[in-house]
Image (tube, helix red, strand yellow):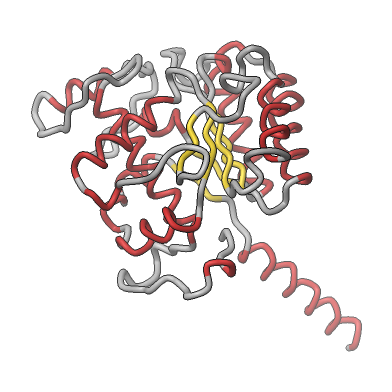
Amino acid sequence: METILKLSLLLLGFFVANISAAAIIIDHNSVANFDNIPSQWIERAKTDLNLAYGHTSHGSQIVTGMTMLRNQNSLYNYTTGSSGFLCDGCMSGAYDLGNPNRTAWATATRNYLNGSGANRKVIMWSWCGQVSTATSSDIANSYLANMAQLESEFPNVKFIYMTGHLDGTGETGNLKIRNQQIRDYVIANDKILFDFADIESYNPEGTYFPNETDACAWCSTWCSSHACPTCSSCAHSHCFNCYNKGKAFWYMMAVLAGWNEGASSDTTPPANPSGLTIR
């Protein structure tokens, strides 16, 4: 009887541990639920979660989307620079996750967090087109292993994983396979993923476009019959694609600040910012 009780307690502990920690996946569903975010969680994110972001042109789509939202609503105003909410391009020594090579970003991140970026709480890097030509080993050893190493060295920093942008190669293409490799790792290890490719793959009605490219042809079709915000330029793509990525970004930041979409919309953020934890 005692053995059964111990086993039951062990299984209960395992179950609780597994439901209390879960991967955070930011994808087209996050875009669809953007309007559910209570404003107080956006404010809390801006106050408590400063981040550094490394990217080249494709990654700039997120920043363009943030700018579009800021132009619509002052709630999405944010500060920039070394002491601001967003430090864009602060991690010198690399441009993105594959430039100048597949590992320079890790060294750049480490040097930054050990130096001028010691106060940063969130780190995010994006790909350009390198996932399309990556091998399984490239993803496992150059990307995922380096992310895991950085997480172990900087346990108080949250690292955002990312998939590569669409390239039109569809369900059987290398991009889809490598992106799925990243997703599977994130889910298995309870990480945080900004699913760049998934956001590009679905229109607001939830229609899936398996053979889409980063140009987002469905965006043009959608905006020909729906009101869409405009921008001066969305690198390689349509402004609506950038806009959706801006929405997904703020959804992610609200979640990282502690928002639970399943809770009441008027839930007040806790009074002690230092007590915030990632769900």
Residue depicted at 89% across the width and 88% down the height: 1
Q: Is residue 248 above or below residue 111?
A: below
Residue 237, given in percent of the width and then of the height, sits at 31, 18
Quadrant in the picture for the C terminus: bottom right
Q: Is residue 245 left or right of residue 175?
A: left
Residue depicted at 78% across the width and 44% down the height: 153
Q: Is residue 141 left or right of residue 269?
A: right
Residue 194, given in percent of the width and then of the height, sits at 49, 38
- The image quarter containing residue 240 is top left
Foreground residue, 95 or 187? Answer: 95
Foreground residue, 15 or 233? Answer: 233
- The image quarter containing residue 15 is bottom right
Residue depicted at 17% across the width and 22% down the height: 221
Residue lying furthest bottom: 1
Q: Is residue 234 above or below residue 13?
A: above
Q: Is residue 141 left or right of residue 19?
A: right
Q: Is residue 30 left or right of residue 232?
A: right
Residue 32, given in percent of the width and then of the height, sits at 30, 46
Residue 255, given in percent of the width and then of the height, sits at 46, 56
Total marks drawn? 0
- The image quarter containing residue 37 is bottom left
